[in-house]
Image (cartoon, rainbow, N blue to C red):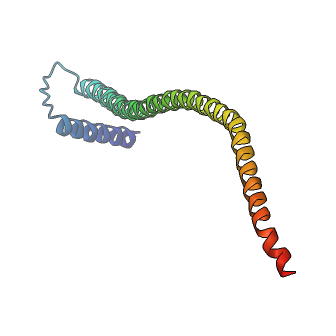
Amino acid sequence: MKEKLRDILLKAKELITSIKAKYHIRLVLTPFTPSLELDSLIGDLMRSRTSIDEKIQKAFDSLQETYGLIGELEKNLKEKNENLTFLRQESEKYSKLAEVEEDHARALIQQLELSLGKGRRREHWVNLVISLTAGIIIFIIGIWVSPIIRALL
């Protein structure tokens, strides 16, 4: 029993000494202060402070990581928003261009139809004049050349 008590006291003393060295604490013990209880109390306070400091550090690290992730997400959202804006502008531009091209195509088709319609009538008259002229020329040549051909036969 004495040995166990002595081992416990030695471990407590080592723990208190290490805590004192780690946190630079200096205890002044008087004959009226119960040193073991005070050292135990200080040890508990230091351990709880250490665990609180560790928790605070973990929370701080977690917040920093979260802040970094939020920054990355914000950057990605800005890029996607810029791309979306660009695509909207391009879509509007091509829609307007398609409308303009459609109007031009309609006008061009109408003009071609009018030209072809007028050209057909005019073309018929031109073809008639050419055919009549060719026929008259061949008739005149035939009349002029036929006595020569009869003489040869």
User: Is 67 placed above or below 135 here?
Assistant: above
91 left or right, relative to 35: right
Residue 125 position, x and y percent, is 71, 40
Residue 58 position, x and y percent, is 36, 32
User: Is 151 placed above or below 63 here?
Assistant: below
Identity of the residue furthest to the right in this view: 153
Task: Judge by depth and name the residue closer to the eye, 40 or 152.
Answer: 152
Task: Judge by depth and name the residue closer to the eye, 112 or 22.
Answer: 112
Task: Judge by depth and name the residue closer to the eye, 111 or 3.
Answer: 111
Residue 62 position, x and y percent, is 38, 32
Identity of the residue furthest to the top in this view: 32
Which quadrant is the C terminus positioned in? bottom right
The quadrant where residue 83 appears = top left
Total labels: the figure holds 0
Residue drawn at (55%, 32%) of the image: 101
47 left or right, relative to 108: left
The quadrant where residue 34 appears = top left
38 left or right, relative to 63: left
User: Is 46 placed above or below 3 here?
Assistant: above
Task: Judge by depth and name the residue closer to the eye, 89 or 79.
Answer: 89
Residue drawn at (52%, 32%) of the image: 94
Which quadrant is the N terminus positioned in? top left
User: Is 149 placed above or below 14 here?
Assistant: below
Residue drawn at (15%, 31%) of the image: 25
Residue drawn at (75%, 59%) of the image: 140
52 left or right, relative to 129: left
